[in-house]
Amino acid sequence: MQSLSPQTPTSLRSVIRPTPRPPLLARVPAAAHHPTRCAYRSDSVHYPNGVGSCKADWQSSCAILASKIICQDSQPPSTADDASGGRSDSVASVNGHKAAVDLTLVPIDANNKLPPTAPQPPKPLTITDLSPAPMHGSQLRVAYQGVPGAYSEAAAGKAYPKCEAIPCDQFEVAFQAVELWIADRAVLPVENSLGGSIHRNYDLLLRHRLHIVGEVQLPVHHCLLALPGTRVEYLSRVISHPQALSQCEHTLTKLAPQAAREAVDDTAGAAEYIAANNLRDTAAIASARAAELYGLQILADGIQDDSSNVTRFVMLAREPIIPRTDRPFKTSIVFAHDKGTSVLFKVLSAFAFRNISLTKIESRPHRNRPIRLVDDANVGTAKHFEYMFYVDFEASLAEVRAQNALAEVQEFTSFLRVLGSYPMDMTPWCPSGGD
């Protein structure tokens, strides 16, 4: 085959060398996957009951949903590629860093130490890893925050069975991974039935231009994990995510009153930390899958104080889906007004008069204008907070009543954005079951 010079145009390269670039992460053997099945999945396709004949018609008829992002073009292939069209390296790299990944279980030796040559779970993406992505493969790639064994990974498997789950060390990285085409979707938590809203993700929803295309509700089943042979009465501390610690506070007081509580970034990360450092006086609160992945023993199962512990996740994509009317839909919006909260009643009335149920309303301080000055001749000048309001309501934007409600809301607000109109998660769940 004719060799290519560095001056060869990228378009000519794609014709001469049609072989796709290797994926970002190393492929995982089928036996290593443990997907959780979902009753449905939301794809960006045309539905007979939708509005318009294609996505372009829908975006034209509802300009609020027509937000776009500009994705960076992929970098041209390296001149170090061999003449056969494949790369000279067998391992894919991102931003100059090799990212060899293997999701197989980590073996533990007799001393419960990780062998130095043992295959490790995938390393989470960081900000420095984000760069123009390689060509897409046939498998859907889903970004989540945390490490393998996290509840977010289980939610990604429930939302998109048989997907390639990509761990990210921060919520921000998961958003950017989708925007830069490193991942096709992101599955991120937005609220917990016990701990409330994850405010960080609400702020990121407004900062980034991704669309909510679905939701999934995952029952949270906490376990107390430690190295094999560890006894509860000898624990000196318990580490986990702050919400997990609060959700198991009463049970932990009964099981290990002598153990101090220490917060870390995520639940599965706490389990990984104990296994990697051979900590025999420390336990973690995490899932049963985390115990399996990192060779830990389950000291206590189902230690959450309330069995009805559910976390709601949203699925994010670069493009919105076409709303339908043949199944229950939910729509998420965010709005603000220059004159503060005085118009909140009028906005809520637009939904009440049309018999549209609101499932959530969340207020967050306006990041760009946190304080508003109010002049009063009698009492002087006052300072009020500026707020953004996040609202979820049970209606599809394919319904006329929802479109009319948003048209009325737009009259009272200075800013209105539809975050997504997507199918509701109607799958049943068992409070006493695992994740």
Image (tube, helix red, strand yellow):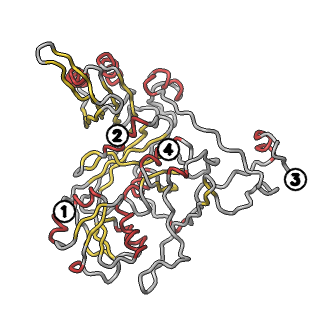
Q: Residues within 10 Å of mark 1 (few under 14, many from 20)?
A: some
Kind of residue indicated by mark 3: Met
Kind of residue indicated by mark 2: Tyr
| Distance (Cα) linking label 2 and label 4 | 15 Å
Q: Residue at x 35, y 36 (%)?
A: 329
Mark before the other along the chain sequence, 2 or 4: 4
Mark before the other along the chain sequence, 2 or 1: 2
Residue 393 in view (yes/no): no
| Distance (Cα) linking label 3 and label 4 | 38 Å
| Distance (Cα) linking label 2 and label 1 | 26 Å
**Image check: 337 left or right of 166?**
left
Position in image of residue 349 (x %, y %) = 21, 22
Determine the secondary structure under disc 2.
Answer: helix
Which residue in the protein does label 2 denote?
A: 202
Determine the secondary structure under disc 4.
Answer: helix
Q: Quadrant of residue 418?
A: top left
**Image check: 191 left or right of 68?**
left
Which residue in the protein does label 3 denote?
A: 1
**Image check: 117 left or right of 241?**
right
Which residue in the protein does label 1 denote?
A: 249
Proximity of marks 2 and 4: CB atoms separated by less than 8 Å: no
Which residue in the protein does label 4 denote?
A: 176
Kind of residue indicated by mark 4: Gln
Q: Residues within 10 Å of mark 4 (few under 14, many from 20)?
A: many
| Distance (Cα) linking label 1 and label 3 | 66 Å
Image: 22 above or below 54? below
Determine the secondary structure under disc 1.
Answer: helix
| Distance (Cα) linking label 1 and label 4 | 34 Å
Image: 168 above or below 423? below
Q: Which quadrant is the C terminus positioned in?
A: bottom left
| Distance (Cα) linking label 3 and label 2 | 52 Å
**Image check: 334 left or right of 6?**
left
